[in-house]
Image (spheres, rainbow, N blue to C red):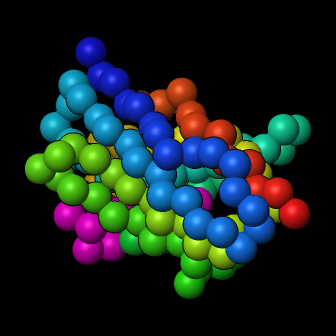
Amino acid sequence: QVQVVESGGGLVQAGGSLRLSCTVSGLPFDDYTMGWFRQAPDQEREGVSCINWNGGKTLYPDSAKGRFNVSRDNAKKTLYLQMNSLKPEETAMYYCAASSFGWVGRCVSDDYFHWGQGTQVTVSS
């Protein structure tokens, strides 16, 4: 049984930082491309960052470049997302997801089949 569990969300002031973690079990973690996605109420889910199996390739939307950093520890089967200089408009539920596809050079939710329940990030102004 595949389990994907996010943690690390919370309330932070604008300009602050948070580090999200995602632990995975039930699949060969180091064979999987991993991604972070977020969804605010009444908005579509969007990719925040994606990373290939060994961390050698990453993708970020322009809005996150220079502020967010995705990493993974395959020995611990854990994915991380360091978020700095957070903005109120980034308030959303953040999800971790796993894809059995190889690196396809994009970060879209349709490619991901195993999802966690999400962790709430709230950025106050």
- Which residues, given as a range, are shown in magenta? 48-57
The one nearer the camera, 55 or 105, is 55
117 sits to left or right of 88: left
Q: Could you tell me which residue is drawn at 28 percent across and 47 percent down? A: 78
Residue 25 locus on image (x, y percent): 24, 29
91 sits to left or right of 95: right
Any part of residue 87 in sight: no
**Would you identify the image quadrant in which residue 87 lies?**
bottom right
**Would you identify the image quadrant in which residue 105 lies?**
bottom left
Residue 102 locus on image (x, y percent): 29, 55
Vertical relation: 109 (above or below) 48: above
**Would you identify the image quadrant in which residue 80 lies?**
bottom left
Q: Quadrant of the C terminus?
A: bottom right
Vertical relation: 14 (above or below) 107: below
Q: Could you tell me which residue is drawn at 47 percent across and 40 percent down? A: 7
Residue 86 on the magenta span:
no
Residue 41 locus on image (x, y percent): 84, 38
